[in-house]
Amino acid sequence: MALAVIGLLAFVDSFLHWADLSLGGRTYSQFNWNGWNAGLGAWLPMLLLLALGALAALPAFGRDFAVPLGLPLVGAVVGALSFVIIVLRWITLPSEMGASMSAAFGLYIGLVLAIAATVFGWLDYRAGGGDLKSATDSLKQAQGSFRNQPPQGGGAPYQQGQQPYDQPPAGRPYDPNQGGGQPYDPNQGGGQPYDPNQGGGRPYNQG
């Protein structure tokens, strides 16, 4: 349930004050950034924590969702990833020509929430009998399964039982107007057909 609370707090924190504009030693709060206009490094980790909290809250509403690797381990990984992203946003805040953006309390709260998600997720994972080795093995196995997935799309596989090319379907008479070989024409080349009005027996046909 702790992860659900963290997700809710992350959503609230995304609207708080994340960065201030400083110029000549003075801070101009009217030009501050909240989590949604402070860049990808601010709103992405908040969305990750919010999604994590939503998954953790589903059982309270009578719904459940099977999370690969388990929700506690995923919570620890998402928390750690969110922490790294927020730190990168902090150290890359713009600064030029004497003006700079400095971190505000919303960014600090985001860091605390990311750390809390990591800690609570890891503690729940340990309570379920997991350890660092099993977590590493699970992550490697998930990565290997993702890489070994066959590509989607492509041409349709060959279906047995299809009619061969240029052959009439079974049970239909031969149509000489369709492709393939032409029917035998007795007036073309080769020996002449047998004429019973000619005398004698059947003529000797060498060809």
Image (cartoon, rainbow, N blue to C red):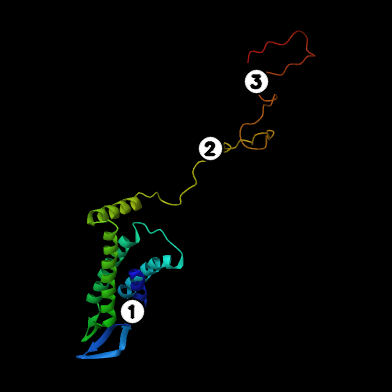
Q: Quadrant of the C terminus?
A: top right
Label 1 SS:
helix
- The answer to whether marks 3 and 2 mark residues whose Cβ atoms lie closer than 8 Å is no
Q: Residue 170, percent across and down?
A: 65, 34
State whether residue 189 is above or below residue 24: above
Q: Judge left or right: residue 55 versus residue 189.
A: left
Relative to 9, 202 lies left or right: right
The amino acid at mark 2 is Gln
Q: 71 or 176: nearer the eye? A: 71
Marks 3 and 2, the one that precedes in the sequence: 2
Identify the mark at residue 173; answer none if there is no mark.
none
Residue drawn at (25%, 80%) of the image: 94
Labels 2 and 1: the sequence-earlier one: 1
Q: Nearer the viewer, mark 3 or mark 1?
A: 1
Three-letter amino acid code at disc 3?
A: Gly
For mark 1, what is the residue?
13
Q: Residue 158, how many percent across, how many down?
A: 50, 41
Going 29% across and 73% down the picture, which residue do you hit? 113
**In the rendered image, which quarter is residue 25 located in?**
bottom left
Image quadrant in which you'd find residue 73: bottom left
**Residue that carries the numbered disc 3 in the rendered image:** 190
3 or 1: tag closer to the N-terminus? 1
